Amino acid sequence: ESKNTDDSNDEASGSTLKCSQLLWSQDNALNFLQKKSDNVKYDSIIASDIIYAMCVVEPMWETIQELLKPDGVFLFAFARRQVAVTIDQVLEAGEKAGFTYTECEETDSGKDLFVYAFQWK
């Protein structure tokens, strides 16, 4: 179930900010679009520190494929942890899902934190 934490409109800028829980998969993403955004895809999606097992990588990319506009940007932060998933595996899966990526400016001199911007190919 999705919960909005802020449904208020900023009348000065004409923008709306909403925060909702999102369950990953193609079906869940399509359901989310219908119920939460009137089938309007998103300009940007931001995710940080969300990959802990390889079994969630493909459902994450399915979700991004369904929700991101053709000219949208997916910002993804990955922290190196003691898990069985590497950033290289996530990047490769993103390319297979139809995205290109660039590494954002280095934010951690120890290279334990990576931030990438993904766009459709």
Image (cartoon, helix red, strand yellow):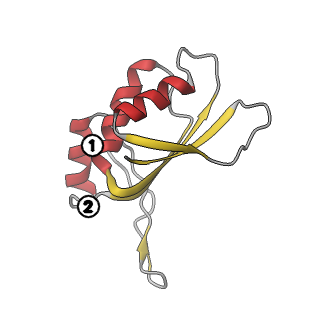
* Circle 1/circle 2 CB separation < 8 Å: no
Residue matched to label 2: 40
Q: Residue furthest front?
A: 121
Front in this rendered view, residue 119 or 23 = 119
Name the residue type under label 2.
Val
> Based on the displayed image, in which of its 4 quarters is residue 103 positioned?
top right
List x then y, in percent, for residue 41.
29, 57
Count the marks: how many? 2
List x then y, in percent, for residue 28.
25, 39
Residue matched to label 1: 29
Q: Residue at horizontal 32%, vertical 56%?
A: 69
Q: Residue at horizontal 21%, vertical 45%?
A: 30
Q: Residue at horizontal 24%, vertical 52%?
A: 33
- Which structural element holds mark 1? helix
Of callouts 1 and 2, the N-terminal one: 1
Q: Which mark is residue 13?
A: none
Q: Residue furthest right?
A: 109
Above or below, 57 relative to 43: above
> Based on the displayed image, in which of its 4 quarters is residue 56 positioned?
top left
